[in-house]
Image (spheres, rainbow, N blue to C red):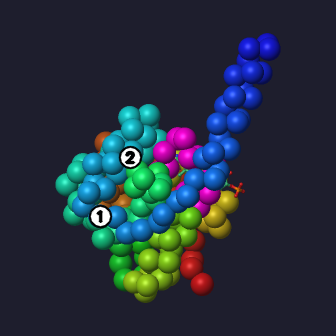
């Protein structure tokens, strides 16, 4: 029991430096592609995100926001994916495990919302296995069938379309 408590307290202490990370948020660059793909695919291997290829990320680079530490190392990413002039998806939201709980995920989503605003998009949707995260950011759970563009583009060809583990959440921007 003592050992468990000691381990737990060491883990708690190691989170403190992460909370003081100096984080830079910026549009993604070509040099970020390998780190973005590695981060997303690490979570995809655990079944919490869908995998992405380097080509898919490179082709959508203008849609990605990244968070980096003071050495330039990737801490997280998120992307906008436009379905129509007014509706877009917030996707590829991922933060490296050592920086979880430090507000990076929240800030990445906020920046994607800002990008959406700049592009004239006022309705954001996410397909996620962690709806609670999005609910804390003001999103509400909705029926996926409300977004036929998404269903036509991604769901119809998916092997898991009748057994989809993802929850649809959405938010209207002011
Ligand atoms: C989900 C994820 C992006 C959150 O990033 P993060 O930087 O740890 O989150 P934040 O610190 O910004 O937390 C923002 C809020 O969401 C909540 N939250 C964070 N992760 C959560 C989770 N997995 N489940 C439920 N709530 C969560 C936090 O408690 C916080 O709420 P609060 O402000 O009321 O305290 C991160 O855990 C991750 O990369 N997970 C693996 C990939 C994934 O599931 N991506 C999301 C779906 S595309």
Q: Indicate yes or no: mark 2 CB to ligand 1 under 8 Å.
A: no
Residue bearing the label numbered 2: 40
Would you say residue 100 sits in the magenta stretch? Answer: yes
* Quadrant of the image containing the N terminus: top right
Residue 23: x and y, percent? 52, 60
Nearer-the-camera pick, 124 or 53: 53
| Residue 106 visible, this orientation | yes
Residue 132: x and y, percent? 64, 52
Tell me which segment is drawn in magenta: 93-106
Q: Residue at x 42, y 61 (%)?
A: 66
Q: Secondary structure at mark 1?
A: loop
- Farthest residue in the right direction? 2
Would you say residue 140 sits in the magenta stretch? Answer: no
Count the marks.
Answer: 2
Q: Residue at x 43, y 40 (%)?
A: 43
N-term mark: 1 or 2? 1
Nearer-the-camera pick, 100 or 6: 6
Eyeballing the image, is 3 above or below 78? above
Residue 104: x and y, percent? 56, 57
- Farthest residue in the left direction? 55
Q: Quadrant of residue 55?
A: bottom left
Tell me the tag on residue 29.
1
């Amino acid at each position: 029991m003592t050992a468990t408590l000691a381990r737990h307290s060491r883990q708690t202490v190691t989170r403190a430096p992460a909370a003081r990370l100096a984080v830079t948020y910026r549009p993604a660059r070509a040099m970020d592609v390998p780190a973005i793909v590695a981060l997303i695919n690490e979570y995809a291997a655990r079944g919490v995100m869908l995998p992405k290829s380097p080509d898919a990320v490179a082709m959508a680079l203008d849609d990605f926001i990244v968070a980096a530490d003071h050495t330039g190392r990737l801490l997280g990413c998120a992307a906008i994916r436009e379905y129509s002039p007014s509706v877009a998806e917030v996707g590829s939201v991922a933060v490296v495990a050592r920086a979880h709980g430090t507000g990076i995920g929240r800030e990445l989503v906020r920046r994607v919302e800002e990008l959406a605003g700049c592009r004239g998009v006022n309705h954001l949707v996410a397909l996620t296995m962690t709806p609670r995260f999005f609910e804390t950011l003001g999103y509400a759970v909705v029926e996926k069938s409300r977004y036929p563009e998404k269903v036509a583009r991604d769901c119809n060809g998916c092997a898991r379309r009748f057994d989809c583990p993802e929850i649809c959440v959405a938010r209207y921007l002011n």
